[in-house]
Image (cartoon, coloured by chain):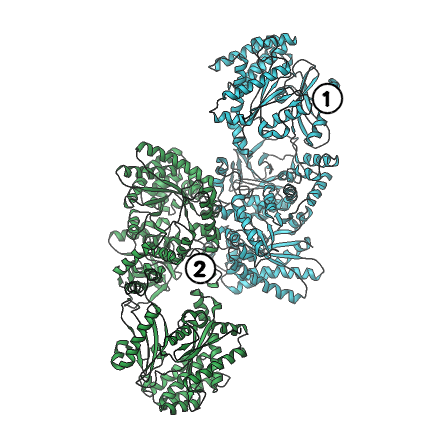
Chain colours: A cyan, B green
Amino acid sequence: MENKYVYSFGEGLAEGTADMKNLLGGKGASLAEMASLGISVPPGFTITTEACLLYFDSGNRLPRKLWAEILTHLGQLENTVGKKFGDASNPLLVSVRSGARVSMPGMMDTVLNLGLNEETTQGLGHQTGDTRFAFDCYRRFIAMFGNVALGIDYGRFETILARKKKKRNIQVDTDLTAQNLESIIHQFRALIKKNVDEEFPDDPMAQLKQAIQAVFLSWNTPRAVTYRKLNQIPNDWGTAITVQAMVFGNMGTSSATGVVFTRNPATGEKKFFGEYMINAQGEDVVAGIRTPNPIAELEAEMPEAYNSLVNVYQKLENHYRDMQDLEFTIENNHLYMLQTRDGKRTVSAAIKIAMDMVYEGLISKQEALMRIPADQLDQVFHPMIDSTVTSKALAKGLGASPGAAVGKIVFTPERAQEMAEKKERVILVRMETSPEDIHGMSVAQGILTARGGMTSHAAVVARSMGKPCVSGCSDLHVDFRKKKCSLNGTILKELDSITLDGTTGRVILGAVPLIRPRLTSNITRMMSLAGENRTLTIRANADTPHDAFVARDFGAQGIGLCRTEHMFFDEGRILLMRKMILTDDPNKQAETLKKLLPIQRGDFTQIFKVMEGLPVTIRLLDPPLHEFLPNASKEIKILAKEMKLSQSALVKKISSMRETNPMLGLRGCRLGIVFPEIYRMQTRAIIEAACKLVKKGMKVFPEIMIPLVAHVNEFTKVRDEIVEVAQEIIEKSEVKLSYQIGTMIELPRAAITADEIAKEADFFSFGTNDLTQTTFGLSRDDAGSFLTSYLEQGVLEKDPFVTVDEAGVGSLMKIAVEKGKSVNPDLHLGICGEHGGDPASIEFFHTLGLDYVSCSPYRVPTAILAAAQASIKHR
Amino acid sequence: MENKYVYSFGEGLAEGTADMKNLLGGKGASLAEMASLGISVPPGFTITTEACLLYFDSGNRLPRKLWAEILTHLGQLENTVGKKFGDASNPLLVSVRSGARVSMPGMMDTVLNLGLNEETTQGLGHQTGDTRFAFDCYRRFIAMFGNVALGIDYGRFETILARKKKKRNIQVDTDLTAQNLESIIHQFRALIKKNVDEEFPDDPMAQLKQAIQAVFLSWNTPRAVTYRKLNQIPNDWGTAITVQAMVFGNMGTSSATGVVFTRNPATGEKKFFGEYMINAQGEDVVAGIRTPNPIAELEAEMPEAYNSLVNVYQKLENHYRDMQDLEFTIENNHLYMLQTRDGKRTVSAAIKIAMDMVYEGLISKQEALMRIPADQLDQVFHPMIDSTVTSKALAKGLGASPGAAVGKIVFTPERAQEMAEKKERVILVRMETSPEDIHGMSVAQGILTARGGMTSHAAVVARSMGKPCVSGCSDLHVDFRKKKCSLNGTILKELDSITLDGTTGRVILGAVPLIRPRLTSNITRMMSLAGENRTLTIRANADTPHDAFVARDFGAQGIGLCRTEHMFFDEGRILLMRKMILTDDPNKQAETLKKLLPIQRGDFTQIFKVMEGLPVTIRLLDPPLHEFLPNASKEIKILAKEMKLSQSALVKKISSMRETNPMLGLRGCRLGIVFPEIYRMQTRAIIEAACKLVKKGMKVFPEIMIPLVAHVNEFTKVRDEIVEVAQEIIEKSEVKLSYQIGTMIELPRAAITADEIAKEADFFSFGTNDLTQTTFGLSRDDAGSFLTSYLEQGVLEKDPFVTVDEAGVGSLMKIAVEKGKSVNPDLHLGICGEHGGDPASIEFFHTLGLDYVSCSPYRVPTAILAAAQASIKHR
């Protein structure tokens, strides 16, 4: 069979349906569907996306057969409406509108009122008895065609129009007389003649052909290409084109045009919402030349049309079972629908609409959950910039941790603490942050850095703290000595106020008002629905009792990753830590570890209490020891004195611990094997804390996790030490304590040899951050120099540190799951990397058959929802 | 059926055979085999290794059944020899000797003359009419039993003996009278009484039981455990024990004992070789108290026994079809064989013996090849220390690149060059080397470093240069300012002479004479045999025409890895390189690249010429750019002047390029994607050089290799650029040039997604160095801090940078091979990591089905032999 490239619709019939979006585009499919539903749409036909690709494949030429098929459908359209294209006495005018599979708002082109020339304009005037209207259509057509098909800047037409209005002292377009418009038309044609070699085509057929080609080509304008790259829309989808009989909202005061939503897209309220404009065509509403009226006023002005519209919107919402975004035109009191599509909405609105529709019986609970954009859910939990206040950004970085923060800028963590003690709200501004900055970060409202990406230290820590962060703001330059910074040239000094928008990455001068969104009953209901509909358990990554509390409050069912290293950065502890690391004397080391023991035991006691009845996975010390060492000369001085060493000897010792590639150096379980006393102390702290609480009648489920295992022998060696220490304490305590010992799977070798390791381990927790780094051979800290370029050039589609790389890292995980389960069917499987809070990744983890994901406390709701969605989708 | 734990032998019969080594140990199996062959061995029985394990499993107790089985066999032995164990009038004496599956020389214990006490010693004297002999046996027994079963240091017995000899002014043991010996026996017993709670057991049964247990336990002495760890012998093999009727080499001048080899173990010469001692027991030969006589002299002294020995040795060599290492005892002119086993030999000897035996028709060519230890083969190609000269090592490091080097020490590459120009031989001594040291390394005789392992920069480069290197010599401390170093406390100043043994890691003071081994015709014949018997092709890693020449000379069939980065470290070039890297001006960059083009083209022209007719794989620039940047302030000064920059600005720029984990940073194809002009220049240089030579009628087969690919899109992006540049040049040149474009597989992600990449690539070359680093998450540069400890503790069995880790890295390679071949059956597969020169790894690569391995030029013969062995083994 020959390919069919053109599909007609109108008069209650259509060749297409709503589910043919891929072929007809969103607009074409919705028009076909509305026509089939008996809703009044101007008749027309849609040229398919396949035709678009054929056009490109033919070297940007319209194949003769395609053009013939178009002409056939054009003939049918003439018959349907009883007008003739190019006929001076009874002219058919058409719109030529782009429409891709998914909406690409404003990215591609449209031409209205096509088919006009001197004669047909005259004919239109005679036919309607309204010369002004005819000229209004003609000037609109020339400008749009001139812009779309001939490439003249649209602004130049607008300038001519504005100049005329000014000259005639006219405020609104509708006050332009026929004479004014005729003069404008002459000027428009003159502008085109001056700028384009070819004559403006007066032949309607030539107009149609050129317009179709121009709309096809608009698929490949740079802005469209960029938009697709940003939104991950494949280039080979192409656009469809709908050619449709014109209806006129500009045919006097009984005509109008408008855009409406079936419910409020900002709040979700079930109330018809939108705007209309009398005597106007669609683009006037968008252009904002006149202020449109709220849709409610239409009821008084055109009661009949309004009632039709209400009927149609209810019909469409019921039909599509979702909030619709509608475009309509009223021509002489008769309503025509031009478009219907699912309306964009805020997350809050999405939640309310979905919950309401469940209540209304319109959709199932599962459908409702699928309607909430999980990746944006945390917006409803973070304070945000009051969007009613306009503000201009000084600079833009990466929206690294969502929410907004207002405060006075400081450049050192010490200063941040100082100011925080004075109850000042501060924003910590750094080139980049390091673990030594933690105390400053923890008291700041937000963090701004010049370097580092979405997974930089600043970003990760900020997200785990639920603090807004803008990272990688390359227009930021800090002069620490002068306590000043410049943002895109604006000089700010210490304690100047700024506002960060951690969602969008904007940095705004001054204190912008923030609002804290309230958790509505809809959110609560939605979350509980999500909780019921998922199979994945959600845990949180929490290192402190406070984090644990927040996580539990958000619905976390345990802690999947409690990092023990952050515990050592507290003042007092860090000094002990440094002494332990830097001494060569095993006795002194043991002594220091003895001092750290009660502190660690205290940490774990608090966390176990908060998480009573739920599992807590504690990772033994992981980072390279030199991360704990001081850099600043002041700190070195203090430490040297404390250790009774010369400063130069200390500096030498410190520098001897530096590594070429610390990420691949002496860290993780390697520490535990080379310095077994550290893990023994940590095990003692965990088990002693747990035993004491169990003795008091509490339920405690510690899970001890060994990091950076590459070989099963590493695991068994450390595990045997843990068991030895733990058993001794448990026996002495005379309590029953069940604990588990498992490992991170964060190195390719661990994944590949997972069967060997699974025989020995109670659980696996995928450390997808490090697994991504080693699988790609890509350091997060250094990736900035090329990852951006990779994403821009399309070498990588997505940042693998944000969404898990299924083909590479994911394949390794799959191997690990299969091999692990094959020898140990009881193996408990989780993931605790940054990907644990990313909905796309969570869906993948669900399909892998993991038992839980663990994410930062503030991502727990997102993860719960994403888990439910994954579960529903793959039921 | 009940387990059988004891096997008898003797009198032409045996329950065991030669191939029961696992059960009977090497010694037990050889005795059984010799008995079956009708060779005269003292009769006895062997207690199996399974009995040993049973003993350990029973909590170090002899199960009653086992003891009963031993006693049954002891009874049979009494019947066979017509003597009775413990019978004062006709006593049976036995030896109790350990014997594991493989020889563990001197590691485990043996007791001779067991069964003696006051009465039986008297009986033995009466029976033989030789009281002195009886006392000699008794004193030997007490000392050995006291040492082995009662734990008294053997030296204390020797001291008593020595004191007696001194007192009596006696030179050799045989001059001790019966009286002397009796007095010694009293002193021995007194020594034991004083040091051991229990009485010395006079009951022969108790002696036997204790001796058997002591020998079993000697399997687990620390020295035995360490030996097994070093030689990768599993702990759960256990040892067998042979209990055997004593025959006496110390029964006067018609008795003797000796050790002989059927051929010369040092040279391989086909000549009976060994030593004997009259009136002695076995341990006297080893102890070196008297000088033994060359075996040839035995012919005159005991012609009958000598003839028997010649018959036996010929019989045994023919039977075992290999050179044998024999132990024998002559008792009253009657020859008894106590042991036969394959004799250890030098590599040269191994080659000669194997080739001779092929000629003699004793073994097949394939068997001959299997007999050469491939991992030691390069010994025959490197100059070596004259082993006839004794020398003492000042310090010991890692034998990182084999061979020996003599020279005067220098501490900087500049000084090395300076001295080399004066025709001085120098040894470059560094803390560690970096690419900037290349020019110094290339003129030095050998390299000594304080830091870095077997695969450190120094080691890799030295091996690729075929230069001896001792790395990681922790007792080396260098004071660069004073131009001095200390080696284990000995202070050396610049230009003092030392000798390095790169095979053993020894550093020797002064110039030790070196000898250059000549390549014998046997070596040549063996290599050509190996060449015929392998399926793997062998290529070499060579960056210079000289390396390429050496490689080809050694039989390399192409270059598998030509690194282009080393080419830029030459003076003159490095400055250009630095300017290119450090400028932000694309014009200046292009200008500099233009200057580098003819230089690179020249490099490739030379290499193509040397390798005419063979493939040359050229890897595009791989290392992080900052590796090219200067560190020394002098160099920075020069560069700043050259670039017209302030020094501080330059330092800032340089430090901005530093990376946290350079190994995982901006390198490999990432460079090619971010700075495409570099790869374009390199492609141009390769293709222009090739086209020019083809035009002259030469055959050139360039293979362009893209490094560090993680994602197929990286490969296609760079490949498309290469093709574009190459096609333009080829068309312009009007020649036919076929070239290939492939990739390194050196990241786990590349291996996992090999099917996607293989669709686009002509070849894969496994970069097992980096693949090992990323699979393990282990940086070679930093592994020193824990890898040694891992190997010592048995966490890892082998250094994964020396022998490829089959379970992890190997599995990834297997996945890559299978996935790659599944979509591209023509895919050419090679490996160019350090493992390409390691025989164990080569065997694995053979089984993987790779097409070639590429190794350093000096390892080519090793690789050829290893490939042949793999091919024969897996035929």
In-image side of A29 versus B38 (left or right): right
Query: A411 above or below A276?
Result: below
Crowding around mark 1 (Cα neighbors within 10 Å: few <14, some 14 to 19, many 20+) is some
Secondary element at tag 1: helix
Same chain check for tags 1 and 2: no
Q: Residue at x 32, y 31 (%)?
A: B732
Residue A697 picture location, percent across and down: 72, 60
| Camera-side residue of A59 and A189 | A59
Give x and y (percent) for residue B245: 41, 82
Which type of secondary structure does the marked residue at label 2 adopt?
loop
Amino acid on which the number 1 mark rests in the picture: Ser
> The C terminus of chain B lies in which quarter of the figure?
bottom left
Q: Is residue B373 above or below residue B828?
A: below
The residue marked by circle 1 belongs to what chain?
A: A
Q: Residue at x 28, y 38 (%)?
A: B694
Subunit of label 2: B
Q: Position of residue B413 (x, y in %)?
A: 32, 51
Tell me which corner region of the image, top left, top right, bottom left or bottom right, holds residue B671.
Answer: top left
Q: Nearer the viewer, residue B393 or B711?
A: B711
Viewer-closest of A481 and A536:
A536
**Residue B643 at what x, y percent from top left?**
36, 38
Residue named by callout 2: B798
Q: Can you see residue B661? A: no
Is A188 or A864 nearer to us in this picture? A864
State the count of labels.
2
* Side of A523 where B400 appears, left or right: left
Q: Quadrant of residue B573?
A: top left
The numbered disc on residue B555 is none
